[in-house]
Image (cartoon, rainbow, N blue to C red):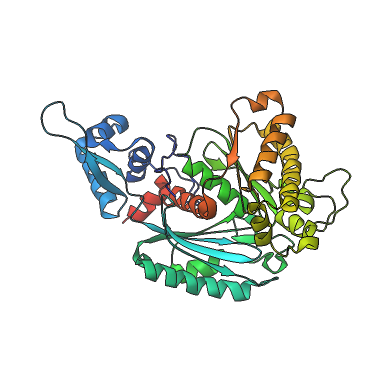
Amino acid sequence: MSVRPLRARTRGDVVTNQSANPPSATSPGHVLAVLRAHGPMTRQELQERIGLSRVTLVERLDALRRQGFVRASGHRDSSGGRRAELLEVDDETSAALTVDLGQSHAALAVTDLRGSVAARETHRLPVRHRPDDVVPMLLDAGRELLSRTGRTGALRAMALSLPGQIDHERGVTVAPPTMPDWNGRTLRDPFEDAFGVPVLLENDANALAFGDYCAMGRPDSTVLGVKVGTGIGAGVVVSGRIHRGESGTAGEMGHMRIEGSDRRCGCGRRGCVAANASGSALVRDLRAVGVRSMDDVVRRVADGRGDAVRAAAEAGHLVGTVLATVVTIINPRFVRVGGAVGILPPFLEAVRKAVEEYAHASALRGLEVSGSELGEDGAFVGLAGLVADATLSPAAVDATLAP
């Protein structure tokens, strides 16, 4: 999967837990932020944009190069005379360890800060898996994966996504009922202790949405990502930031209630969208024809089996009907649908048609609804993007370079 190079916002919008004191407009971190937003650039172009003296700029760039933040990327075409060297942010040398944890799996990948995957592996997990069993396994698997790729010394940070809400201040999960043993567990500490780097936690749908945002080259547009797998979730990226809401529940469209439905949902309520149109719901609805897992659903749809195709289309129509309301309220430019069920053609086409039929006409102007093109890389790309924003922020860079 080819992911477009990182481009930061001009104003330096990044996700970081660094000090609230803003870095100097002439600090090395600020120089890097300008280069992220506008590079590749020559030294003279940087000097003109930032307003630093030539000597000071050279000092800043030397410090950034020593820590692996900046590299040469060729030369500017010359109109006569010596060609000027181009500089860019080095987002390929540093590594991130990313983990996508779900109800039945744990997928790990070593990536660079662009989200390009160097190596990955997936572990199947038992029903009602527990942190005390899974966390040690993830630590061992992460160490082995870093060693195998030779990226242990290049590790800049780690990021982990999982269903449910995250208490970002304390690094604690507020997991869904399908993962009850993960509720209230502190996850940041064991990984920070093991790897000695910052650890970021994120909701899985948010990670997927941010991955699509990064893969599109970080457009100046609102992106709504919808993940339909075992459950249903959504993430919203506005002005380059994940919008989590006041209590971290922004995007939980899977638990909006459908009028007239009495189906029990895994959250304990009845009538939720997820109870009627998620991967789990499709497995239940197709059990009579031998379906026992989401993999069975995907296979039957791929084989053109009428029962599975119809069920997927009906589920897509229901999700699209709810999504039309979300689209009308948020008014995004892009909607990207991912997840094992979300990318199934009959499901996706039904989603698109329902949104076009039910969303407000103004919200449909310029709207692009399509399937995520990231496949299994979606969460990894999003998590790598969050690592990049956190570790390449002006405050984080200046802290790294501080004597």
Asked if residue 255 can be seen in this view, the reply is no
Q: Where residue 90 appears, x then y in whole percent?
A: 32, 49
Q: Where residue 7 appears, x then y in whole percent?
A: 41, 40
Where does the C terminus fall, quadrant-wise? Answer: bottom left
Instruction: Please give left or right for residue 216 compared with residue 162 in the image.
Output: left
Q: Is residue 353 above or below residue 157?
A: above
Instruction: Please give left or right for residue 225 compared with residue 118 in the image.
Output: right
Quadrant housing residue 243: top right
Which residue corresponds to the image point at 63% horizontal and 56% vertical from the top-left? 167
Which residue corresponds to the image point at 69% horizontal and 70% vertical from the top-left? 127
Which residue corresponds to the image point at 65% horizontal and 46% vertical from the top-left? 234
Q: Is residue 236 above or below residue 137?
A: above
Asked if residue 122 can be seen in this view, the reply is yes
Badge count: 0
Residue extending furthest toward the left: 81
Q: Where residue 188 appears, x then y in whole percent?
A: 55, 64
Q: Where residue 314 appears, x then y in whole percent?
A: 76, 45
